[in-house]
Amino acid sequence: MSTSPTSPKSPTSNSQEQSTSFASTSVHVTPHITLTLPRKGRAKQLLKDFYGLPDGKKADPLDIDFSAFDVNKYVNNMLAEKHLSELMQRDNDLSTEIRQLDGDMKTLVYENYSKFISATDTIRKMKSNVENMESEMDQLSQSINNISNVTSSVNSALGLKRDKILQLTGVHDLLKKIQFIFELPTRLKNCLDQKSYAQAVRYYAKTSKLLEHYRSLSVFSSIEIECKEIMDKVTKRIRENMTNMNATGSEITDCMALLIILKEPPQQLAKEYLELQKNFLTNLLRKTMEEMSSLSLDSSQDSQPKNADSELKKEPSSPISPKKRAKSKLTYLNQKFLKELNKFVESFNGFFLMPPREIREAKSPGKSPGKSPRSAGNDILRIVSANMDGDDRDIARQDFLNFTDDMAKEYFIIVDSLLEFPEQITNLNPSTHLQLLNDLYYATLSCNSLCTIARFEDRVNEVITAWEIKLAKSLFGTAEKKLMEKFTKYAENELKKESSTSSNSQVHELQSYILEMEATFSDYLTGDCFRLLEECIKTETPMIQKKGGVDRLLKEFQTQFKEFWRSIVQSSNKYIAPVHPTPITQNPIQSPPSIIALMMSRVLLDFGEIIAIQVYMTFSNILYNQHNDYRNRIGAEIYNGLGERFTIAKELAHDVREVVGICKDVAQRILERYVEIKGNQVSSKIRNIYIPNYIQNLDENLGKSPLPEKVTPIWSEIITDLVYIEREVVMLYGGPVDEEKSKEVENIVEKRLNPILKPDTSSNVSGGDKSLLSPGTALIKSPYAHSNSSYSSISSTRSRTSPNPFTSSVQLTSHIDKLFSDRVEIYGIVEMSIVGIMMGIIKILLKTWIEMIRLNTLTNKSFQQLQVDSEYMRVKLWRFIEDEGIMNTMLQELASSAFKRCIEDPLPLVYADIEMIVSGKVSF
Amino acid sequence: MQSDLFFTCYNKLTSNLIQSKASLWRMGKAIPEDSETNLQSHTPVATSLPLENIFEVDGDATIKKVLWDPKKALTGFVSIHDYALNVWSFADQFASSKLLNTFEFPSTSGPLTTGAWNPHQSEIAVGKDVSISGWDIKSQSQTFNINEAHSVMVRALDFNPNKPNQIASAGDDCKVRFWDLRNTTESIKEISDHTHWIWAVGYNRFYDQLFLSSGSDYQVNLQSIVSISSATFQYNDYDDNKSEDEYKEIISKPTDGLVRTYDQHEDSVYSVAWSAHDPWVFCSLSHDGRAVINRVPREEKYKIIL
């Protein structure tokens, strides 16, 4: 190594030898190349050796960069494969490469050369330093020789006496021990007198084994007996101390440790210990609670010294005082109680639950007691643990866990009481509670053994989560309650009104009522609710601010929020009257008026279309904007019912869609329910007149006149009902009220109602009908434009075909009609519009009519009456609906059913007569 | 067996009064049992049998329904009137009938609507307005009463033929309810698959997990009610040893629910009945006079019998 840099010429000579041999075989190659190639290879080899690199890949004789490179082969290969021009090119390339390599090597050599120079300098320095070392070494060896001589002489001089000394020391020790043992009874007695039981126990513990071992010797056995007697007394005393009412927790623990050392039966001890500590801790807890309440008295008196009576009530004027009070309470509680509990848990665990530590701890007794602030002599006490077998230990553990469970429960009850919510949830100051929870959290974290053994931490976390959920629940719950209260109030009013007068002045205020309801609802949510939640999230409490805390909180709120919508929907579903109340209810509750269903459906529809999205928007803006990286997120886009676009935090998008979907869905279902209820209500009137065979009686009532004189009064009543219903519906589904339109609606309603509402003014129903049919009303199209009345069609068929009333042709026509008309879904999907709702109700009404007719047997007279009635309905119903097709189909079916059920030869009235009767111009 | 006897209920107009009466009829003898020719003829032509009116049931002219004894005892029958329930016994080889006793009902609420004879004991259940009540015709005492069984009128009743104490009821609230007569405070099952009044219900006479209902929504619904049927236990234990079943894909355990809706009718279906002979055949009759005979779907059948 040392030679290689110093003799740079030797490799060249070496390589020259090689190169000549190469040259001889490949004459035609330029000598320049043959000279440099091996040199390069060698230099490479040298460098490789220098850096300790392993030999690279598998040798390839054709690769110019490898050590196994074979010039001859390479050249032959080149000659065989390449053209002259390519060879020339290759030659040129090679010469430039070589030149470059030369240059590289030169720089390399220069760099290494400077290093070499510094190395020689170092070596020179070393050389000069080493020179005077020789003499110093000589001196050293001489002195060492002297020392060894002296020691050997000393050794030989003392050699004889050493054994003796050793023996004497042993005897001395033994005597000391025996002395100790002989003195032990007196010592123990002293200890007993001085009440230093711990010392006594320690002495006894030290010697008891020895005494046991030498029990056979009478001297020792007498000592042992004496000691035992004393120790029994000690034990008794200790027990007395322990069971003393005033013993503190740590005293009990100490006593217990002593007893364990004295080898009292551990199972019993464990039980005793648990019992004692239970008493102590329960007392402590009670005392602490008392003190806590007095504490609160003090503080409240501090803040409100004049007002002695209002100590217990929270003063809204001093928002800090309750906060402080609660906080100090908790701190007090933690200090007094939690610490004791922790200590107890720790010692119990050490005493009874851990496997015996004597073996482990005996080896390194100094390590464990680091925590204990007591004197080092107490170490024994700290590390004692009872010897129990597995089963007993399990039993003890079970008891212990039960006990800690109980204690923890009580503790948390107190904590919960501190976390009470004010009655008005909006008055809540969440930061107070958060502060409290934070304190709680860190207090428990500091209680190690409690956390590990009794899973205290989990419990605290549970408490915290429970608090969060409770907060969100009560916040949102209030919103829901408020909303439902409004409904209830309205329902009550409505019921009252029903019982007193049938006033209808309030109906048109319904829409504003609902709008206001919705506004307060969303105001409450976006205002109070979200403000509180925001405070929670913004709070600087370290517990929340620690990693993931906010996210968790948000997640919690989010789920609660979704739950809230669900529960609104659910309770609204529950709240409205069922179509068919469940049978056999012991105490039937008065079901809310059906208009509530309509309102509910409207409100839910609004929720679904607009409000839910708006509220979620605010939710997203307030809560998720706090997140610094919110802007980087891609907000999802949501469209509301009006086609406006909203951007919302991604996490919420799914929820929003779901909530909107649910709201709309339920709104639809509730509306269907409303339609069904109303339809049944209206049609129950028909049920009452058409009970089977009633028509016989009806016939008798119809009077002597061979032809029907007027429309059956029940139908005008039904029309009145429908008008009322339509009024309700118009108010809620009539779109936004603009003044004129509402007035117009009002007018129409008035017009329709007038004749019927005041039955006294119009002498008979037909008189009222006249005004209804008056052509002056702009809204009334002439229904008579459709002259293909079902009855006239039947009569024409009849007259044309045959006199036999049961000719199949009538049935045939009706069947063929049926084939072409769509099947009518009676309780089908109701369109969410005025017309849709009314149509739904009318369909139910007509269907009931058809079915009731089919149950009856008609006479010619009642058949004609029916003809008149149905024409009347056709005229009246026509206004409520848009699509007359369905109505006409159903009336047609009514006609054909009636026709079939007519026992006599039905003689349909002439259409003109019907028209006369319906319009009240009876001319018989 | 007297399979050639049947009752009809009808309205009659006598002296301008509509009367609801019932009559017992006897079908004339069927075509002589020439089995050879019968089998060979591929187009069996229904020959109208001669009918013989045996007698008309007496009593007030408001007969709703006549019930045969489901035990096929053929000793008597029960007629349901507007406000009465009459028990009759045959006399003179079915040539006449004798009134045994009568149950009167108050005429304050609506008339009786329907009735059913319990196949397990001598008990008649009748529907009156919204309630159902049961009457023992031997001891002449009331056995049960379900007030407000339906929120609107009760229109149909049927006893479970295989499981005592179970009755099905249906009515104008579009619901079918199943009751355990030992505790009638609440129904044991409720089906609401109809969209208008239900007029007829029927348990399959052999497999009571099949149940028919029909109504004025022009539909006949075939329901599976295996969970409350007498076959419930049957499916609980023999589940494992049918691995080699080649129909494994189509056959699974029967479950509750609508098996099929038959909507061939163009008008309200007022009656539905199971075949007394073939457990898989049933017939439904609608207002337009169309009677439709259907079979239980094959998959459901396999589910039950395999």
Image (cartoon, helix red, strand yellow):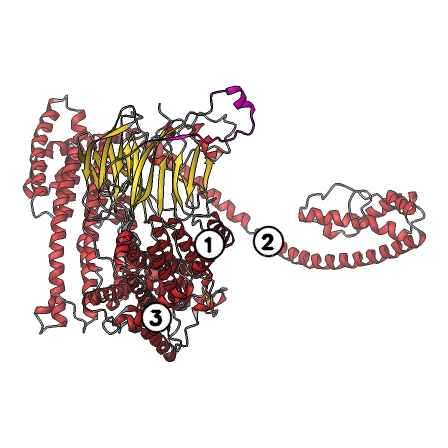
Q: What kind of residue is marked 1? A: Arg
Q: Residue B36 colored magenta?
A: yes
A623 or A569, which is in the foreground?
Answer: A569
Tell me the quarter of the picture where residue A173 sits: top left
Task: Residue at the far bottom: name it.
Answer: A740
Q: Closer to the camera: disc 2 or disc 1?
A: 1
A196 or A77, which is in the foreground?
Answer: A77
**A859, above or below A194, in the image:** below
- Residue A257 placement (x, y as % from top left): 17, 40
Chain part drawn in magenta: B32-54
Q: Which element is circle 1 on?
A: helix
User: Mark 2 or 1 closer to N-term?
Assistant: 2
Disc 2: CA contacts within 10 A as few (<14), some (14-19) or many (>=20)? few
* Label disc, if present, on residue A742 of the rendered structure: none
* Label disc, if present, on residue A921 of the rendered structure: 3
Q: What kind of residue is marked 2? A: Met
The residue wearing badge 1 is A798
Can residue B134 be seen from the camera position used here?
yes
Can residue A541 be seen from the camera position used here?
no
Q: Which element is circle 2 on?
A: helix
The answer for which chain carries disc 1 is A
The answer for which chain carries disc 2 is A
The residue wearing badge 2 is A126
Q: Which element is circle 3 on?
A: loop
User: Mark 1 or 3 closer to N-term?
Assistant: 1
